[in-house]
Structure formats: structure tokens, C-alpha cells
Amino acid sequence: MDDGCFELMMHCLNPADKNSNFDVIRGAGDTEPRGWQSVYYGTRQPAVSAVLNVNSEGPARIVSVFAPACTESCLRANGNMLHWKSAGLALDIKLLMPGEKYIVELLKWKAGNETEQMNIINERQMNAH
């Protein structure tokens, strides 16, 4: 894995949204400020810029995940589930729908032959008493 390399996933959790789009650019053009950084006055350098456009009439939850980039990693979203796999490790995160009090409902991870899971909602309810 190279230093500074990462994988970015942006996901909109909203059952009514069918028109979201994700865009990553670097150095967008001469008149566009997006995709540039200026460390010193009068100079600019290309910089990564990510945008997720969402059209929603109801509540929406936007999740951004930065993960180390390596040749064996896989990051994907399916409905309210986020899945990440890399070299013998797998992580599943079940998100609650927008408008709920909490964001995460369940964490499940697997390392080698060992699998563990934690129901976040039950843990919070037990700790509240």
C-alpha cells in the first residue's frame, strides 16, 4: 500500500432517491475553483475534490467512508448495508434508516475463521438501565 492512497465511497441511504450521483475531480479547469488548492498566494495545484449530489424530498443519510487502498480491498454499499473486505478481514455495517435516533444498528466482522457481531441498539438499551 502506498502512503496517502485511499479508497473513497459515498453512499446516500434514502429509499426514495434514485438520482444521486458521485463525482471526483482533480484540477477542474481554469475558471472553476473546485479541484484546486492554493498553498501560497498566486499559485494553485490540482487537488482531489469529491461531491455527492442527492435529490431528496424526505430524510436522507449520507455516509462517507475512507479506507486504506490496497490491491485486495473491496468496499461497497447495498441498501442499508456497507461491506468492506481486505486481506483476511471483513466488516459489515448495518445502518438504520434516515430519521432514526441512531445511525448504526449492527456491526459484524470476520478475521480469519473468527466471526463476531455486536447489535448496537441492544448494547445502548442495556447500558441505559
Image (cartoon, grey):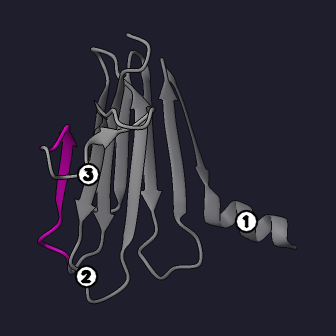
**Is residue 34 rendered to the left or right of residue 64?**
left
Q: Residues within 10 Å of mark 3 (few under 14, many from 20)?
A: few
Percent x, y of residue 108: 50, 43
Secondary structure under tag 3 reads: loop
Three-letter amino acid code at the position of disc 3: Pro
Q: CA distance from mark 2 to mark 1?
A: 30 Å
Percent x, y of residue 123: 72, 60
Q: Residue at the far top: name it.
A: 1
For residue 33, which numbered disc appears in the image? 3
Three-letter amino acid code at the position of disc 1: Arg
Q: Is label 2 or label 3 in front?
A: 3
The stretch of residues the image draws in magenta is: 17-29
Secondary structure under tag 1 reads: helix
Q: Is residue 27 above or below residue 105?
A: above
Q: Is label 2 or label 1 in front?
A: 2
N-terminal of the two: label 1 or label 3? 3
Q: Is residue 54 visible?
A: yes
Q: Quadrant of residue 25?
A: top left
Q: Which of the image's four quarters has the C terminus?
A: bottom right
Q: CA distance from mark 1 to mark 3?
A: 44 Å
Q: Residue at the far bottom: name it.
A: 57
Percent x, y of residue 4: 42, 20
Three-letter amino acid code at the position of disc 2: Ser
Residue with the mark numbered 1:
124
**Is residue 57 rendered to the left or right of residue 32?**
right
Secondary structure under tag 2 reads: loop
Residue with the mark numbered 2:
56
Q: Nearer the viewer, residue 14 or 50?
A: 50
Find out whether residue 61 is within the magenta segment. no
Q: Is label 1 or label 3 in front?
A: 3
